[in-house]
Amino acid sequence: MRKRPLVGASAVVERGDGAVALIKRLWEPGTGLWALPGGFIEYGEPVRETARREVEEEIGLKVEIGDLIGVYDIIKRSPEGGVVYHFITICYRARVLGNSFELKPGEDVGGARWFMPSEISPDIVTDTTWQALCDIGLVRC
């Protein structure tokens, strides 16, 4: 059987003061690092719907999915050069619906919190999160 990458969707969720919602990862890739809320696309599920659903499941906010930020590869190789895993993440901007910005971490995350851009550095977030935040100009790269 031919191996294929696993595909997911994520979203940059911003608060009115410029803060960004991040989740603490429990599993690879990026175990223990902060990341954008997101997850795997379910068979037959549109990508934007995945991003919306995952934000609600992981941080408890209802959002409207906006513009595409980018498509990112996450590839880990073994010391011998073989592929250990390959994920593709499709990342969007999202706008919170309603007036509540209270984060309610889901069971599949190690926590959730709002970060001001000045608190975010490449050593505390996943590479994909850092790249997406760079691509929209929220952090200086």
Image (cartoon, rainbow, N blue to C red):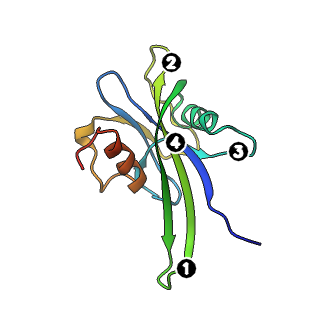
**Amino acid at circle 2:** Leu
Tag 1–tag 2 contact (CB < 8 Å): no
Q: Is residue 44 left or right of residue 109?
A: right
Q: Mark 1 or mark 4: which comes first in sequence?
A: 4
Tag 3–tag 4 contact (CB < 8 Å): no
Q: CA distance from mark 1 to mark 2?
A: 43 Å
Per the image, the residue denoted by label 4 is 10
Q: Which mark is residue 82?
A: 1
Q: Which residue is at 43% across, 47% downward?
A: 35
**Amino acid at circle 4:** Ser
**Amino acid at circle 3:** Glu
Q: Which residue is at 63% across, 57% downward?
A: 6
Q: Mark 3 or mark 4: which comes first in sequence?
A: 4
Per the image, the residue denoted by label 2 is 97
Q: Secondary structure at mark 4?
A: strand
Q: Is residue 43 above or below residue 127?
A: above
Q: Is residue 86 above or below residue 114?
A: below
Q: CA distance from mark 2 to mark 4?
A: 17 Å
Q: Position of residue 92 (x, y in %)?
A: 48, 37
Q: Mark 1 or mark 2: which comes first in sequence?
A: 1
Q: Secondary structure at mark 3?
A: loop
Q: Mark 1 or mark 3: which comes first in sequence?
A: 3
Per the image, the residue denoted by label 3 is 42
Q: Secondary structure at mark 2?
A: loop
